[in-house]
Image (cartoon, helix red, strand yellow):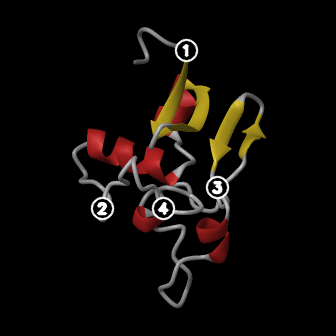
Amino acid sequence: VRQIAHRIAVMYAGRIVELGETDQVIGEPLHPYTQALMASARGEGFTSGEVANPAHLPPGCHFHPRCSLAKDVAGGIRSDCLADYPEFREIDDGRWVACHFAGERKTHE
């Protein structure tokens, strides 16, 4: 991808979840799905859980059933992730992400 595009968009369940300079998105992904995707590309496995069914997407953030950032300290799902689809917002100059908690943790667990 680096050889053909200087900017990339990452999509999950039909929506863009991260957009930015290719080197930034690949090297320091902010969205948990992008983090998991990059870990998988490096052969480090992938996140557990069921892939969202496009015909029956979960409420709120569609990635929340598989997202480690969506889990609260009690092991439940954070209410923001359940209630609202995250706004696609600019985190840094030209760097956009759709996650309530983007930047809270830089690496995927």
Q: Nearer the viewer, mark 4 or mark 2?
A: 4
Inspect the image, locate mark 2, and give the three-letter code of the amino acid beneath it: Glu
> Residue 85 got which mark?
3
Identified by mark 4, the residue type is Pro
Q: Which mark is residue 6?
A: 1
Instruction: Looking at the image, tell me whether mark 4 or mark 1 is earlier in sequence order.
Output: 1
Task: Give the residue at mark 2.
Answer: 50
Say which amino acid is labelled 1: His
The reply to whether the C-beta atoms of the residues labelled 1 and 3 are less than 8 Å apart is no
Verify CB contact (< 8 Å) between mark 1 and mark 2.
no
Q: Residue at x 43, y 66 (%)?
A: 65
Query: Which quadrant is home to the N terminus?
Result: top left
Mark 4 → mark 1, Cα distance in angstroms: 32 Å
Q: Residue at x 53, y 67 (%)?
A: 69
Residue 51 position in % (x across, y down): 32, 55
SS assignment at label 4? loop
